[in-house]
Image: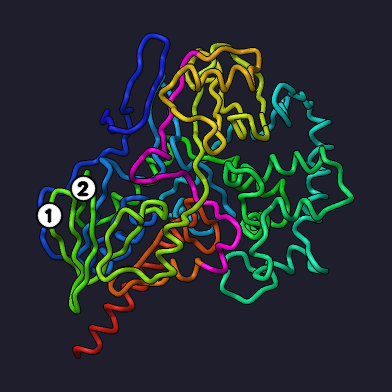
Amino acid sequence: MPRTQEGYLWWQSHTERGLETQAVVPSSNHIDNTYHVIVIGAGFAGLVAARELAAKGLNVLIIEARDRIGGRTWTAQAFGEDFEMGGTWVHWNQPHLYAELTRYNLHRNLKTSNGTLKPEVTYWQKKAGTKSVLEPKAMEDVMEAAERLARKVFSMDGYTSKELMPYPHDPTRLAPWRKYDHLSVRDRLDAIKDESDENKAYFQGLTNTFGTSPSNEIGFTEALRWYALGGHSLTQLFEEAGLYKLGNGGMTSFAKAIFQDYSGAALFSTEITKISQSPDKATITTKDGRSLSAGRVICTIPLNVLKTITFEPPLSALKQQAIDKGHITGGAKIHYKLRHITPPWFYQALPPSPLCFAYTDHNGTKEESDGTYCIGFGLNGGISNIEDSEEVIKAFDQHIGADNEVDGYVSHDWVKDPFSRGTWACWGPSSSTVYLQELQLPHGRVMFASADTADGWRGFIDGALEQGKKAANDVLREYSKSHRANL
């Protein structure tokens, strides 16, 4: 099986840098110097944009810095199992994504994680040194209180959450939420006086998962959008954002389905450094000094990486300000292999725990179960080095334990990864109303498309597909107009 340069495996007997994955694909045999469209990035935004453009007869090139497709999603093979190293969760209420899954008949491959489907116990760590063990009935009471508090937090000045944000997929439409964009989740919680500190703490634990960040760093309207996308219900939201995933090859099977449907060229392991423009073309300069030109460019580079690219002419001051600010999500995702089989559990914590949340995934897919596999999500900065096995195992042993021992783990450091510089996008206060529309605007011949700047499911694969298709449609309209002008 192919092996990417990315990812890390720790086992008691050895370590590995670079994991096996079907996401590694070769570059095209022949690369021209000029194309109708160059798409930068082979994540889901880039793949779907390139597919749509090539299908309309345009000459398209994908340039990808990594040695694989998928961007911030890829499925690794280790310990005889599949592991989703990045983006994972899918749901039929994510419209762009589910349309693509049904197109490739992949919606029949959905499966669940047992720790989010029906945990037999929930571990709740409000502060260091303490951990509550909540049985299912107790969790029902906790979630009932959280739902009640959510209705208060996401209602303001006589507006219900539905009135504040009636159209979560259409953020440019005037709606009352815009006047509250300067607030953080913590600001709203502090304004609620008729709920206990315990209820507020657990609610913070839930919303901290939106950006693996403390509540004072997460924008109120960012959390409100998540809540609205979940049908104004925390229970429904967490089903949509953390229950269903793809089996039979995982996210890489999805990315490969789109890539195999693409008829253009692709160039991998090629980092770009500069995008320049003249009146009649855009030119891409690569790190190794190569120049490639196109009539249009679709740039799907993640928001936190755009600052490493030189644009000539320069970007607008507001767009550059947004890029310098970036998004806030910079945690870790660690797949632990545990020695003993354990019933399903879920873990949630507040800082200073290095893990924001964790849960069991499954007990192995082989004929003879070889332990329990669980997933831990680190708070921003909570785990400084995923290759430091002592630190990574200590995070599990001291904060979760779950009467188990860590035999091994796999992870990828998305924060230190130069082509992501973070995980999924979550925005802080005073961001959506100030930066979103500006980040979505083209820069001359350069269109931007990323899950980081999606209208609806921002930070999700659905958001990447939304933006990729939109950029492709914009390019097709431009070519259609220029063609008519030449008739």
* Residue drawn at (28%, 72%) of the image: 445
Does the magenta portion include 420? Answer: yes
In this rendering, position of residue 437 left or right of residue 177: left
Circle 1 sits on which residue? 290
* Residue drawn at (36%, 30%) of the image: 7
Label 1 Cα crowd, 10 Å radius (few <14 / some 14-19 / many 20+): few
119 up-or-down from 454: above or below: above
Q: Residue 154: name its quadrant.
A: bottom right
* Residue 229 image point, x, y percent: 63, 57
* Display coloring: rainbow
* Residue 330 image point, x, y percent: 49, 42
* Residue drawn at (58%, 35%) of the image: 112
Q: Please identify the residue farthest to the top as the structure is shown.
A: 13
Label 2 Cα crowd, 10 Å radius (few <14 / some 14-19 / many 20+): some
Q: Which quadrant is the C terminus positioned in?
A: bottom left
Q: CA distance from mark 1 to mark 2?
A: 10 Å
**Is residue 105 something that shows in the picture?**
yes
Amino acid type at mark 1? Arg
Nearer to me, 331 or 191: 191
203 up-or-down from 187: above or below: above
Q: Which mark is residue 441?
A: none
Question: If you read the primary sequence from the N terminus, does the residue marked by circle 1 or circle 2 appear first?
Answer: 2
Circle 2 sits on which residue? 270
Nearer to me, 101 or 218: 218
Q: Are marks 1 and 2 in contact (CB under 8 Å)?
A: yes
* Residue 33 image point, x, y percent: 11, 61
In this rendering, position of residue 436 left or right of residue 344: left
In this rendering, position of residue 35 left or right of residue 165: left
Q: Give the residues drawn in magenta, as a range.
A: 407-434
**Is residue 369 something that shows in the picture?**
no
Amino acid type at mark 2? Thr
